[in-house]
Amino acid sequence: MRIYIGNLNYRLRTEELKNAFLPFGEVIGAKIVRDQETKRSKGFGFVEMANEADGLNAIEALNGTDLNGRNMIVTQAKPRENVTPSDSQTSEN
């Protein structure tokens, strides 16, 4: 199960994010999204959990809780939509 985590402290490390979810079950991976040019955190990330039930428990338990001074927003990640400029622009000639 893929989980979205928002409102993260900009100094939070990936290992700290992963450790917040470990008490709820097996964490396959964790990622903090960073700006490509500056490498600074964008303040959100994702955690992948092996088991959906564990992921749902983690969402319920951690949403709104403090992690390094910020209250996390924890929800189930939505599928990524790949929209290219050519898909959204049509010409009517």
Image (cartoon, rainbow, N blue to C red):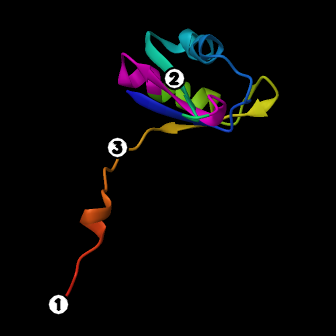
Q: Residue at x 46, y 29 (%)?
A: 56
Q: Amino acid at mark 2?
A: Lys
Q: Residue at x 31, y 56 (%)?
A: 83
Q: Is residue 46 magenta?
A: yes
- Residue placed farthest to the bottom in the image? 93
Of residues 44 and 55, the one nearer the viewer is 44
Q: Which residues are magenta?
A: 38-55
- Residue placed farthest to the left in the image? 93
Q: Which residue is mark 3?
A: 79
Q: Which residue is mark 1?
A: 93
Q: Which residue is mark 2?
A: 31
Asked if marks 1 and 2 touch (Cβ < 8 Å), the reply is: no
Mark drawn on residue 73: none
Of the residues under marks 1 and 2, which one precedes in the sequence? 2
Q: Give the structural element (helix, strand or loop) at label 1.
A: loop
- Disc 1 crowd rating (10 Å Cα; few below 14, some 14-19, many 20+) is few
Q: Determine whether, in the image, residue 5 is placed left or right of residue 88.
A: right
Q: Considering only vertical position in the picture, is 3 above or below 86?
A: above
